[in-house]
């Protein structure tokens, strides 16, 4: 049975000017001649490197051991020899160790059939250990270790939401996974149900993917998995897990410990970890942009250079002025195309010179557009003024911690005031001072 549920509040509909690969099949990206694999691809502390220069590594071999409860294991995405171990800067500005692997030797698993391992008789500790050992983290951008998210007392989860909505406009990787890997995703849902015993399970998809509903319902029915498919509006930022849960439950968005949302890419990675014994060494991401001749949803090995993927998709360097990791709304502009793909890389977007020009900022006209589109029921212009006056503490009192820097306020502002960027800076300062500015996600 399908349903159409409304976004609780706010949101925007950016024009789909970028060449969207929503209807493009998943293509295997070329293997990197050198994979640069960071030890920090998750929240928490970087993994502890377990190899040294000159070591021979095999595909899927553990090369970084989780350090602390919110850290995650890191594995070699390709076979070869460790050419170097260096410190690199990530797109986030954080620095960490990275293992450089020169491609070489044979692939022990890729392209070869793998025997499914039985899992339904396993208890929660064994299932969670398979997920933990494989280094699975949230692939919707949060990168929180999945085994921690699912480590709950069975029966305390009222809603399990399988989130099939791409988080940003012009990205299509989650849609592509639903089209091509529905049985594996549904089995991932089944694994979550075995761990959580949820009161209700919903697979949420965008209205842009509504044509998939009959096939998804057939797969769910054939698998004997008690779950409902629900269609949500294609209105940014509907893919945010708090908004997905809020829409499904018909209430304002808030942190709800009784609900669990898991991205479909994460569910697929869970399937591979639990059923196939395969660690997380690649991910599907979207490469697009107006200067990209062949936008694609690529299945890329972790550690592949961003520049290599853009070249593979036909980016025109002469026309490209800006490259963003993530999506056009919340992505991070990068200065180097030598950065590697990580578990948290949702997409790569290339912009032309005209698109990259900063708009001219003018004075606020008090139109209220930013308030109208804010999904978190904030007053962005009021928070902006408080932060500009240096009163981060009062901004925190007035809800700054609920801001997720989705960019809706900046997008809707006719004066082109950088509301989202300023609110993000204020939130980080307030959080550092312990004034409640931490992100509520």
Image (cartoon, rainbow, N blue to C red):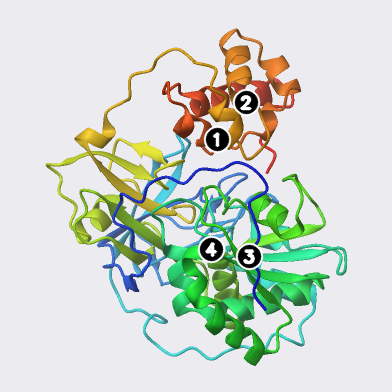
Query: Viewer-nearest of labels 4 and 1?
Result: 4
Q: Residue at x 55, y 35 (%)?
A: 405
Tags 4 and 2 in contact by the CB under 8 Å rule? no
Q: Say if 245 sits above or below 363 in the image.
A: below
Q: Which residue is mark 2?
A: 427
Relative placement, left or right, of 236 versus 247 is left
Circle 4 residues within 10 Å: few <14, some 14–19, many ≥20: many
Q: Secondary structure at mark 1?
A: loop
Q: What is the quadrant of residue 248 in the picture? A: bottom right
Relative placement, left or right, of 369 versus 106 is right
Marks 4 and 2, how far apart at CA? 30 Å
Q: Which residue is mark 1?
A: 405
Q: Which residue is mark 3?
A: 4
Marks 3 and 2, how far apart at CA? 34 Å
Does residue 304 appear in this view? no
Which circle marks residue 206 in the picture? Answer: 4
Q: Say if 295 sits above or below 1 in the image.
A: above
């Amino acid at each position: 049975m399908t349903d159409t549920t409304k976004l609780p509040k706010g949101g925007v509909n950016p024009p789909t000017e970028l060449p969207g690969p929503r209807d493009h099949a998943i293509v295997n990206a070329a293997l990197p001649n050198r994979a640069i694999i960071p030890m920090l691809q998750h929240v928490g502390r970087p993994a502890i490197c377990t190899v040294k220069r000159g070591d021979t590594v095999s595909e899927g071999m553990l090369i970084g051991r989780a350090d602390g409860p919110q850290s995650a294991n890191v594995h070699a995405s390709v076979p070869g020899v460790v050419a170097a171990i260096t410190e690199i800067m990530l797109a986030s500005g954080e620095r960490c160790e990275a293992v450089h692997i020169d491609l070489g030797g044979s692939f022990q698993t890729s392209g070869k059939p793998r025997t499914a391992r039985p899992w339904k008789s396993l208890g929660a500790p064994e299932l969670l250990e398979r997920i933990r050992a494989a280094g699975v983290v949230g692939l919707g951008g949060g990168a929180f270790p999945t085994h921690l998210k699912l480590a709950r007392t069975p029966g305390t989860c009222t809603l399990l939401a399988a989130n099939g909505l791409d988080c940003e406009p012009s990205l299509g990787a989650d849609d592509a996974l639903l089209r091509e890997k529905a049985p594996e995703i549904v089995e991932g849902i089944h694994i979550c149900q075995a761990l959580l015993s949820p009161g209700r399970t919903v697979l949420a998809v965008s209205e842009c993917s509504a044509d998939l509903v009959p096939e998804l319902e057939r797969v769910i029915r054939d698998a004997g998995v008690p779950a409902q498919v629900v269609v949500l509006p294609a209105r940014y930022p509907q893919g945010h897990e708090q908004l997905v849960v809020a829409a499904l439950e018909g209430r304002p968005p808030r942190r709800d410990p009784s609900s669990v949302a898991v991205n479909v890419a994460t569910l697929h990675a869970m399937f591979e970890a639990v059923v196939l014994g395969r660690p997380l060494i690649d991910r599907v991401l979207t490469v697009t942009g107006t200067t990209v001749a062949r936008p694609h949803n690529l299945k890329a090995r972790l550690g592949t250079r961003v520049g290599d993927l853009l070249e593979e998709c036909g980016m025109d360097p002469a026309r490209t002025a800006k490259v963003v990791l993530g999506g056009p709304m919340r992505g991070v502009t990068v200065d180097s195309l030598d950065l590697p793909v990580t578990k948290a890389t949702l997409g790569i977007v290339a912009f032309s010179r005209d698109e990259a020009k900063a708009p001219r900022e003018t004075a606020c006209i008090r139109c209220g557009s930013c308030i109208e589109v804010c999904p978190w029921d904030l007053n962005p212009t009021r928070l902006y003024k408080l932060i500009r006056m240096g009163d981060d503490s009062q901004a925190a009192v007035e809800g700054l911690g609920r801001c997720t820097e989705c960019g809706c306020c900046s997008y809707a502002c006719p004066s082109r005031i950088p509301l989202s960027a300023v609110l993000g800076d204020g939130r980080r300062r307030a959080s550092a001072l312990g004034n409640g500015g931490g992100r509520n996600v």
